[in-house]
Amino acid sequence: MPNPNTYEFYQAYVTNVRDFLLAETEIRRIINRSSKTGKSTTVKVQTKVYALLYSTFSEANFMKMILTPHGFDQNYYEEILRQESIQEKWLKCLELAFIKFKTHSKGSEVPNKILGLRKIIEKYVVDPSILRNKLAHGQLSIALNSKNTNLNPQATNQIQNLDFITVYKWFQINQMLCCIIEDLIESPEKAHYNQYYTKFQELEGFISRSKDWTLESKMQTKSMKRKVPHLTVK
C-alpha cells in the first residue's frame, strides 16, 4: 500500500471527487434548463465549462484511484507519477495493476483485458484531455497547434462542435472505468475476479447505448419537453 503518510492525500481526493460530482450535477442542470428555454449562448458557454470540469475531475479521480488504501506499494505510486503525460500515467497504472494478477490468470486473459481497457482510456480519458489543454490555454473558440505556430482546424472543429451530451458520457465512463481498475488495484484475486466481467459489460453496454445520443435526441425526451415553470416574484 502507499506510504501511510499519503492516506490524508487519499482522503482529500475523496472529498475533491465528491465535490466535483456535485458541481457536475449543478452545471448539467443549468445546461438542461437553458436548453429547454432556448438560451443557446448559455448552453455553449456552460458546455465548455463542463468540459473543463470533466478534465479536472478526471485528474482527481485518477489520484484517488492510485492512492486507494491497500492498493499500490509506494514505489509503484511514485513510478506512475514520474510519467510525464496523462496518457503515460494512465497506461503505467494499467500495466502495474495487472502485475500481481498475472500469476493467477489464463494466458490470453491479461492481454485481452489490457487491450480493452487501454482503448477506453485512450478514447475517453486521453483524447478529452487534449481538448481540455486547448481550452485551458485560452483557446476557447479557435485552437492552435502545440507549438502555437499555426492554427489547428481539427481541434477548432472539435471545440466548436462540443456538446454537453458528449461530456456527460465522459463523466459516466470515467467513473465506471476507475471502479474497474480500483478493484484490480485493491483486490485482484477477489473483487476483480468476482466483478470484472459484470462491470466491464456494464461499461461496454453504456458506451454502446450512448453512442448515438445527441443534443437533438436529448431534446426529444419527456423531461426536456416539459415546460419550465415561470417564477413569480413577490
Image (cartoon, grey):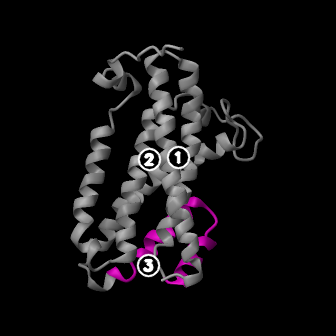
Marks 1 and 2 sit apart, C-alpha to C-alpha, by 6 Å
Residue closest to the eye, 52 or 227: 227
x, y percentage for residue 118?
41, 60
Checking the image for residue 113, the label placed there is: none
Please say whether residue 74 is one of the residues in the magenta stretch.
yes
Residue that label 3 marks: 71
In the picture of the structure, the residue carrying the numbered disc 2 is: 171
Question: Identity of the amino acid at label 1?
Answer: Tyr
Q: Residue 29: x percent and y percent? A: 46, 32
First along the sequence among labels 1 and 2: 1
- Do the residues bearing badges 1 and 2 touch, measured as CB atoms within 8 Å? yes
Q: In this view, does 178 lie to the left or right of 128?
A: left
Residue extending furthest toward the right: 149
Question: Would you say the residues marked 3 and 2 are in contact, meaning their CB atoms lie under 8 Å apart?
Answer: no
Identify the residue position indicated by label 1 in the image.
54
Which residue is rendered at x = 49% and y = 13% of the image? 232
Mark 2: amino acid: Phe
User: Is residue 203 at least partly visible in the picture?
Assistant: yes
Give coordinates of residue 122: x percent, y percent.
Answer: 46, 54
- Is residue 3 something that shows in the picture? no
Q: Which residue is drawn at 33% across and 80% down?
A: 101
Query: How far apart are the alpha carbons under marks 1 and 3?
Result: 25 Å
Q: What element carries label 3?
A: loop
Q: Which residue is drawn at 36% across and 55% down?
A: 176
Q: Tell me if residue 6 comes above or below residue 28 in the rendering.
A: below
At x 41%, y 61%, the residue is: 178
Whole-percent x and y of residue 216?
38, 22
Query: Quick one: label 3 or label 2, which is nearer the N terminus?
Result: 3
Q: Is 186 covered by the magenta stretch? A: no
Start-end of magenta stretch: 73-101
**Displayed quadrant of residue 80:** bottom right
